[in-house]
Image (cartoon, helix red, strand yellow):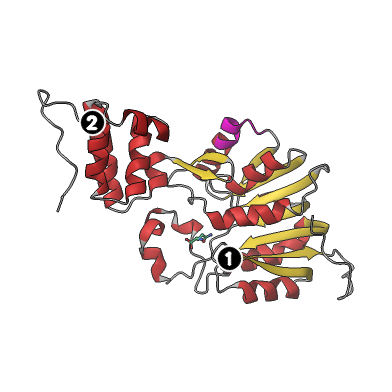
């Protein structure tokens, strides 16, 4: 059993080969993670490893790799070790100040895009943007939309704004503050959020990647719904007539979120499933002052 990072070989030893380093790391951490981290320290694409796996690597690369493998062995998420995470077609910077974007949230974006006409301008808000994933995906896939992203963490907003710059996206703006607080007097055609939704005492918080992610992005009161309740309560003051609210939530919170939206006057309330078939995103349309009849026109399915 290996303990701690491999020692750096003495200067007169033969330089290690990339494939040998990888083989050794694969005995200690998940093989896919081992490859991902090696490509990261080598700054090489995956194909390079197959063509040049027998290439010697420098002692500095070997040492950097050993350090990352040791950190991964202690549980640090790969995305924080590489500082990168793919989200839809975007490559985003992530730091421990931001939640690591997940596939569940790609589903939320897909549902938002289906409600945004590519040809029409639209005002969109992403509340609690973190790395900017939702806001940037929508801004890039709906260039006519003007996206405003909020976060109460200035450190997260800096990461998100850096991602926007790196991607050359100009139709997204960032404002500091919690949920709708920095958006006083503004209304949107679509508001999306992946707020914290885990119950404060949930044992998942002490396992896996979640141990390393910002607690404020994960946990939300005894039933995990504190932030969702606040967002739903304030949403009608910030939605245009017929505007959509889309919320990611826990797999067992669908019924509760649907009830919150209906009680607040939303119609076309529905829940979509994640890739594992669990309830994950609930949405509703704000009918404005005049509620539409129960048998009103169906929701657009563009
Ligand atoms: N979906 C995440 C998880 O359970 C939690 C993200 C969140 O609270 N918004 O790992």
Query: Which SS type dominates the magenta stretch?
Result: helix
Regarding residue 178, the answer to whether it shows in the image is no
Location of residue 141 by image quarter: top right
Q: Residues within 10 Å of mark 1 (few under 14, many from 20)?
A: many
Residue 231: x and y in percent read: 66, 62
Question: Number of labelled discs?
Answer: 2
- Give yes or no for contact between labels 1 and 2 (Cβ–Cβ under 8 Å): no
Judge depth for marks 1 and 2 and give the one in front: 2
Say the numbered circle drawn on residue 249: 1
Residue numbers of the magenta segment = 163-169
Which residue is pictured at 58% across the width and 44% down the height? Answer: 132
Q: Ligand 1 near label 2 (Cβ, under 8 Å)?
A: no
In the image, 272 versus 151, the foreground residue is 272
Residue 29: x and y in percent read: 28, 50
Residue 253: x and y in percent read: 58, 73
Which residue is pictured at 21% across the width and 27% down the height? Answer: 59
Residue 209: x and y in percent read: 39, 56
Location of residue 197 by image quarter: bottom right
Q: Residues within 10 Å of mark 2 (few under 14, many from 20)?
A: some
- 286 sits left or right of 136 in the view: right
Provide the secondary structure element on which disc 1 rests: loop
Say the numbered circle drawn on residue 17: 2
Q: Residue furthest front?
A: 51
């Amino acid at each position: 059993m290996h303990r701690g990072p491999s020692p750096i070989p003495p200067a007169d030893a033969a330089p290690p080969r990339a494939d040998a380093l990888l083989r050794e790391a694969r005995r200690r951490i998940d093989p896919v993670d081992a490859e991902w981290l090696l490509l990261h320290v080598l700054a090489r694409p995956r194909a390079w490893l197959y063509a040049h796996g027998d290439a010697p690597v420098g002692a500095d690369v070997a040492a950097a790799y050993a350090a990352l493998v040791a950190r991964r062995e202690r549980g640090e998420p790969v995305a924080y070790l590489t500082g990168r995470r793919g989200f839809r077609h975007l490559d985003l910077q992530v730091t421990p100040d931001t939640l690591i974007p997940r596939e569940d949230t790609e589903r939320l974006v897909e549902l938002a895009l289906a409600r945004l006409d590519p040809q029409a301008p639209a005002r969109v808000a992403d509340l609690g943007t973190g790395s900017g994933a939702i806001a940037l995906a929508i801004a890039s896939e709906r260039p006519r939309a003007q996206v405003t992203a909020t976060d109460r963490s200035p450190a997260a907003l800096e990461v998100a704004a850096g991602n926007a710059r790196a991607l050359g996206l100009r139709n997204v703006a960032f404002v500091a503050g919690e949920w709708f607080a920095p958006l006083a007097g503004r209304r949107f055609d679509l508001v999306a959020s992946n707020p914290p939704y885990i119950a404060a005492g949930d044992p998942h918080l002490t396992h896996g990647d979640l141990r390393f992610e910002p607690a404020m992005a994960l946990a939300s009161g005894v039933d995990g719904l504190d932030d969702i309740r606040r967002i739903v309560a304030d949403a009608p003051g910030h939605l245009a007539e017929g505007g959509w609210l889309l919320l990611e939530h826990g797999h067992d919170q669908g019924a509760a979120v649907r009830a919150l939206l209906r009680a607040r006057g939303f119609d076309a309330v529905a829940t979509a499933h994640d890739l594992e078939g669990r309830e994950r995103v609930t949405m509703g349309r704000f009918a404005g002052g005049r509620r539409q009849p129960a048998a009103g026109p169906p929701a657009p399915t563009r």
